[in-house]
Amino acid sequence: MLIRNKIRAIVAAAAVFAALPAMAQQNQAADSVIIRKIYDNALTSYESYENLRYLTKKIGARLSGSPQAAAAVEWSRQVMDKMGLDRVYLQEVMVPYWVRGDKEIARINSPKSGGYTDVNILALGGSIGTGTQGLSAQVVEVKSFEELEKLGKKKVTGKIVFFNRPFDNKIIQTGTAYGGAVDQRGGGPVAAARLGAVGVIVRSMTNDLQDVAHTGGTRYADDVTKIPAASISTNGAEKLSAQLKEDPNLSFYMRMTCETRPDVLSYNVIGEIKGSEKPDEIIVVGGHLDSWDVGEGAHDDGTGCVQSIEVLRLMKDLGLKPKRTIRAVMFMNEENGLRGGLKYAEEAKAKGEKHIAAIESDAGGFTPRGFGISGTNNQYSKVLTWKPLLAPYGLHELTEGGGGADIGPLKGQGTVALIGFRPDSQRYFDYHHTVIDVFENVNRREMQLGAASMASLIYLLSQYGL
Amino acid sequence: MLIRNKIRAIVAAAAVFAALPAMAQQNQAADSVIIRKIYDNALTSYESYENLRYLTKKIGARLSGSPQAAAAVEWSRQVMDKMGLDRVYLQEVMVPYWVRGDKEIARINSPKSGGYTDVNILALGGSIGTGTQGLSAQVVEVKSFEELEKLGKKKVTGKIVFFNRPFDNKIIQTGTAYGGAVDQRGGGPVAAARLGAVGVIVRSMTNDLQDVAHTGGTRYADDVTKIPAASISTNGAEKLSAQLKEDPNLSFYMRMTCETRPDVLSYNVIGEIKGSEKPDEIIVVGGHLDSWDVGEGAHDDGTGCVQSIEVLRLMKDLGLKPKRTIRAVMFMNEENGLRGGLKYAEEAKAKGEKHIAAIESDAGGFTPRGFGISGTNNQYSKVLTWKPLLAPYGLHELTEGGGGADIGPLKGQGTVALIGFRPDSQRYFDYHHTVIDVFENVNRREMQLGAASMASLIYLLSQYGL
């Protein structure tokens, strides 16, 4: 049945193309020339790559509220200011400010199996600290919330709960595997604390076996005790799990001095080219300017930011006059609050702005595969008619469903279509939220191809609407 | 017209799928289950990755004739021997043996612009040395053979010719850009020597601006003086070109002690699963076991070798009984002679073997994009009917034309189709023929997906022929 459906879908899509009126076919011929120019320019300009170098190497990690986040706001404002856009402006937003404090310390203490074993952990964003003396307790390992519930208060009270469900490596799209594991990181502390746990460690969110830990946000609930929560490297998790089998009474020591400080004023940074015919119809392209406080926020989401700026640069440099307004938005605070995305949507609503599409690049600067589109059937069908223009550049996957965290809050405002740029997903979780998410792990051409892909789709959207 | 043709092609392909008889559709449903199992197994087994680790880290670089090449032969024989295949055997082949000697030294000497500047070069494979004193001469820069011809003997005699035509970065497939530049490396020494040059340096074959030089084979002609030839890193090439503009009389010093030694006995290594119904119909899957003598030959072509072995492992582990014979071939001496590929084809012909298809993986262990197929129209059309089975795994690009250097000599033997595995090409020339073509630059999942892609196509070929 799967195959038969696929065949039907392909026949249907082909019929759509074949049925295009001669006028549309002529337009496509002209559009294909423009799209070729977009790729030529993107692949031979070093501007987006040098922008990424500055953002990652000169500014670096930039968690919301940090001085580096402020530097990133001012830098991106200046970059867009010099581009001769129609408008560059900031949008005020109050953001949470969490600081990691000292480098974390963690070790397994198992007299029965090897004594002390140091392991790499990273406090989860938003976590409370352990106090400067650290926390030591026995460990219970679980793979799911159901398993935790079954253990019950008696076996959990006073313990550190170790969530150790790995990614399902059989899943081709790593983002889907992430989706199948990240509930542990987000929901672990509340579930564990309800049963009396004193701390939480979560297996890092990656397909790989690595020594580096992957941080990321977690949540507390107002009616549940807050307990310290950290991620542990996958190699560390494997060690801990193996030692627990030999010695269920081993203890785990963790020390974290992280804390949440008062909210800080920050900004979304917005640059705009006004549409020549329908300036009131807005197309957003964006990424998030904040990053976790480890590494350099290169793939997450430096590339999304510089690609969004590159879309505007390509329009200007090629002398394209988009009929509709194109707005590049560097959202603030995607990682630990989404305040920027919420603020943007709130103001759009308050001003009665008409967004026809929003495209987010927040899956890394990898080789492009396509776009995921959340919209009406008609909107999706219209995007599909552009497939012959996009497929020659490797954009074969124009799939239903997709978007991005920052653009998500726009959902339901008029008929805005939410579109996620889809780069190849295989390497993303090697780097995501780690010290190795650095400039050197971004390939220039892959990132440039992503920017060109986004610019090509946005060009079509700006000409023909949705 | 381009667009219209594309639409026609899509409509035609869709028509093929729709016209599949019900029986074929039922087969496809069953095949889709098996292909899913192939991917599940490949993505959760670490065997191919550990094989790659051994080949790159324990054996390392393995140029034809070297002790490491001999180790790679024995290692791959042992690996396949343990797999319970129907037959594992070696095929004798005499190979050239070129040795690099001391680490090369090269510097620009420009009193007018900066004095001495050290640059990275690598002797080209097959090059003669400079003698231990090295070679110093003035430099003429050219971008093409036409430009060189125009300079003529008067301006070239006694000089080092510097071929500096870069990759065309506008080309999406980097292999095509390579094809547009590599004539300089292969043909540079003969063309330069004909005009009296004393040496050649060639801009490294890469899209990137790097400090590492990229080696690779070059050629001499019997009737032309042999002169030393080296590649220079792209950053070095940019420096030299800039300094030449300021100071056309600068001199370039290079020292290389490479030499060609007598031919050495080596082997192709072959493992085979006999077909259950048509054992005489052979499907080859292969890569080349030799590598350049710098780096670890990870992407070129360690991944192709371990992926080919993995294809056999998957067949065994999943209990698939291919109807036709599948033969994994680790070819020897692709890099500087192709003697293994030539020998394999010669023996196949002498024995009257019937090869129906040969698939080579020699474009790196990157995320899969598809296959390139050189065969009859009917063969290509048959492969296209499998697209619905392969596209869910990102294999969208089943294109006409393709193959591989090692399988090339089989061309014309009966109706063998030559098929090249096509991984994404963007990062290949970052590493190709350099010290950084190492294990760490291979992503496990990308490599595993490649092996599963090859195994899936080969499974279909083994069931249905071509």
Image (cartoon, coloured by chain):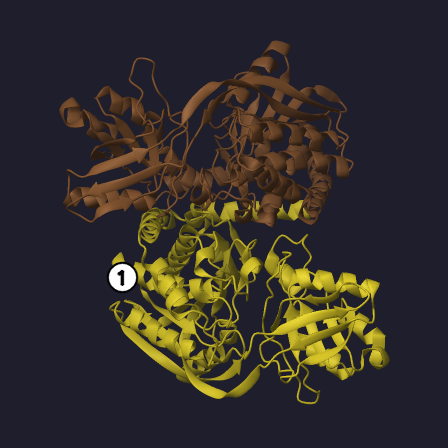
Chain colours: A yellow, B brown
Image spot of residue A73 (x, y percent): 37, 76
Q: In this view, does A133 lie above or below B331?
A: below
Q: Taking B237 as reference, is B27 left or right?
A: right
- Nearer to the camera, B348 or A215: A215
Q: Quadrant of residue B51?
A: top right
Residue under label 1, please give it.
A316
- Nearer to the camera, B237 or B25: B237
* Crowd tier of the residue under label 1, counting other residues whose Cα lies within 10 Å: few below 14, some 14–19, many 20 or above: some
Residue B50 visible in the displayed image: yes
- Nearer to the camera, B323 or A294: A294
Q: Residue at x 69, y 57 (%)?
A: A168
Q: What element carries label 1?
A: helix
At label 1, the amino acid type is Lys
Which quarter of the rendering shows the C terminus of chain A?
bottom left
Q: Taking A229 as reference, is A446 left or right?
A: left
Tell me the subunit letter for badge 1.
A
Image spot of residue B116 (x, y percent): 24, 45
